[in-house]
Amino acid sequence: MEDAAWDALGQIIDRLPAHIRDHRALFFSLHEGYTRFAFGCRLGPHLEPESVLHDMAHAIEFDGDLDHRAKHGRMMFGVPHKTIYGQWVDNYSDWTSTRREIRTFRIQEALTRIVGVEFDLDSSLRTMDYMGDWYLVPGNSDESRMRTMQEYYAGLPTPNESEMWAVLEKWLDKTALRLMNMVHGSRKLMYWNGVIH
């Protein structure tokens, strides 16, 4: 299975624009999500090469803001918190986090179309009930919340391809600078063939 996943990842990488594909700070890992400055190929217990496109979409949705969104090499989503009876808990006041995720899906759909990978919007939206602010999505049932999310998605503009790549390149440029500063600061990273170990 790992060989097939790596082959699928290689096909995705080959279809990226050259300035992204060949960027010195474009790294991939076997982890889930964006960790250690690398886009992960895992979704839960499974290797899912297409998941790198979701995390690239997050980098684009964050407008390339590596300094605040991936300060220590992993994505940070800025969930509001407060203390209740001594417990640190999420403190959502609206469905901002779910809307951010839906905007990311919109960008991911554009990326998947470019690299020739399928994207299933309904399947992606069904995962939103795991979001901490799911209960704040307008609607009084799962079906009505799903309609609200579909309507929000439908109202989003189609991402501009050249703008997406420019923002992702900005993210990667900042990653390269951050890694160079880390190496010069005696922190060593091991990487081989674009994969951080």
Image (cartoon, rainbow, N blue to C red):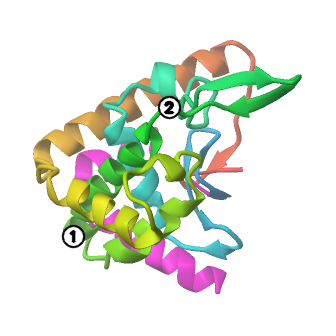
Q: Residue at x 56, y 52 (%)?
A: 131
Count the numbered circles shown.
2
| Picture residue at 36% right of the left edge, 75% below the top | 122
Q: Residue at x 57, y 23 (%)?
A: 71
Which mark, by number, is residue 121? Answer: none
Q: Which residue is mark 1?
A: 113
5 falls in the magenta region: yes
Can you give x and y, in whole percent of width and height, for residue 190 in the image? Answer: 71, 42
Front residue (pair 180, 39): 39
Q: Which quarter of the picture shows residue 78?
A: top right
Q: Is residue 171 left or right of residue 80?
A: left
Assign the N terminus to one quadrant of the image. Answer: bottom right
Q: Position of 124 compared to 130: left or right? A: left
Near mark 2 (Cα within 10 A), the count class, few <14, some 14-19 or many ≥20, is few
Residue beneath label 2, please? 93
Work out whether 57 lies above or below 146: above
Q: Nearer the viewer, residue 146 or 45?
A: 146
Q: Amino acid at mark 1?
A: Arg
Q: Is residue 24 visible?
A: no
- Residue 8: horizontal and vertical position, in percent? 45, 78
Residue 16 position in % (x across, y down): 27, 59
What is the quadrant of residue 153 in the picture?
Answer: bottom left
Calculate the distance from the C-alpha at mark 1 to the C-alpha at mark 2: 34 Å
Give residue 111's position: percent from left, percent from top. 26, 60
Q: Alpha-carbon neighbours of circle 1 within 10 Å: few (<14), some, or many (≥20)?
A: few
Instruction: Judge whether 81 appears above or below 50 on screen.
Output: above
Q: Is residue 129 above or below residue 37?
A: below
Question: What segment carries the magenta color?
Answer: 1-30
Amino acid type for the residue under numbered disc 2? Ser
SS for tag 2?
loop
| Residue 19 belongs to magenta span | yes
